[in-house]
Image (cartoon, rainbow, N blue to C red):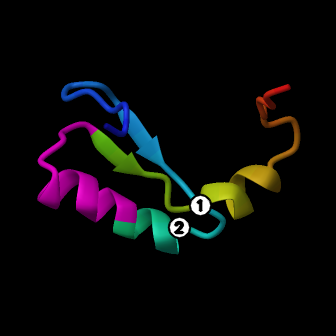
């Protein structure tokens, strides 16, 4: 239902990495998905990188 497929690489993130760690745990240990990674730095780290690409939807 969530659109994630087993075997697909998935990266979860939030503002500081706290909520995304919960999402990583649920996807990995409760739903049994593999190839799930948590970006610990999340938006706080990424947004402070000069020139880091950010994709925006219309």
Quadrant where the C terminus sits is top right
| Cα–Cα span, label 1 and label 2 | 5 Å
Q: Residue at x 80, y 48 (%)?
A: 49
Does residue 53 appear to the left or right of 38 in the view shown? right
Residue 43: percent from left, percent from top: 69, 57
Residue 37: percent from left, percent from top: 36, 47
Above/below status of 45 relative to 32: below
Q: Which residue is mark 2?
A: 17
**In the displayed image of the protein, which residue is found farthest to the front?**
1
**In the displayed image of the protein, which residue is found farthest to the bottom?**
18
Q: Residue at x 79, y 37 (%)?
A: 52
Q: Which residue is mark 1?
A: 14
* Quadrant position of residue 15: bottom right
Secondary structure state at the residue bearing disc 1: loop
Cβ atoms under marks 1 and 2 closer than 8 Å = yes
Q: Residue at x 36, y 39 (%)?
A: 2
Residue 46, magenta (yes or no)? no
Residue 25: percent from left, percent from top: 26, 63
Residue 34: percent from left, percent from top: 18, 39
Quadrant where the N terminus sits is top left
Query: Mark 1, residues whose alpha carbon is within 10 Å: few (<14), some, or many (≥20)?
Result: some
Please provide the residue range marked out in magenta.
23-35
Does residue 53 appear to the left or right of 27 in the view shown? right
Above/below status of 17 relative to 4: below
* Quadrant position of residue 9: top left
Query: Mark 2, residues whose alpha carbon is within 10 Å: few (<14), some, or many (≥20)?
Result: some
Above/below status of 39 relative to 4: below
Secondary structure state at the residue bearing disc 2: loop
Q: Residue at x 29, y 25 (%)?
A: 8
Main secondary structure along the magenta-highlighted residues: helix
């Amino acid at each position: 239902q969530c659109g994630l497929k087993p075997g697909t690489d998935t990266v979860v993130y939030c503002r500081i990495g706290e909520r995304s760690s919960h999402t990583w745990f649920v996807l990995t240990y409760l739903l049994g998905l593999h190839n799930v990674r948590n970006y610990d730095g999340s938006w706080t780290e990424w947004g402070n990188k000069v020139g880091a690409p950010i994709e925006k939807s219309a």
